Amino acid sequence: MPKYNEGLISTTGNTMEQATSKDTIVISMPFNASNRDIRALVFEEDCITPFDSDSYFTIGTTTPTSSAPDGFIQFNTTLEMNVTAINGTKYWNTFTDGTRGRWVLQAYIL
């Protein structure tokens, strides 16, 4: 349990992906957190570099999907990826080692 003025956040299930159009894939990750303000960001693989365009991703968190009496909330972080915008960039092309692009989704509490 978190101590006074500390917070706790953890994933609670499997990441789900869904193509919502020919241009868009939505990725959803469930979390459990201390009942505080929640936010999310997406970065390049190094976990600190933001992407050079706001058109590649839209990221957000849902309203709590449930609220337990223990002071924790459950919510989903959603990452909407614009495949058309990111296609052909350095973030989408196959890497020389045969892998694909990697991104870091950061969900955090305030």
Image (cartoon, helix red, strand yellow):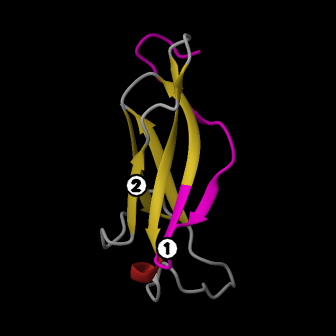
What residue is drawn where x is 50% and y is 14%?
Answer: 71
Quarter of image, res 36 = top left
The three-letter amino acid code for the residue at tag 2 is Ile
Magenta stretch encompasses residue 39:
no
Quarter of image, res 80 = bottom left
Q: Position of residue 98 (x, y in %)?
A: 69, 84
Q: Position of residue 46 (x, y in %)?
A: 49, 62
> Is 74 above or below relative to 53?
above
The three-letter amino acid code for the residue at tag 1 is Ser
Q: Position of residue 51 (x, y in %)?
A: 36, 68
Nearest the viewer among 72 and 19 is 19
Q: Which mark is residue 21?
A: 1
Range shown magenta: 1-27
Q: Position of residue 97 (x, y in %)?
A: 68, 84
Q: Is residue 71 left or right of residue 58?
A: right
What residue is drawn where x is 39% and y is 80%?
Answer: 85
Q: Which mark is residue 59?
A: 2
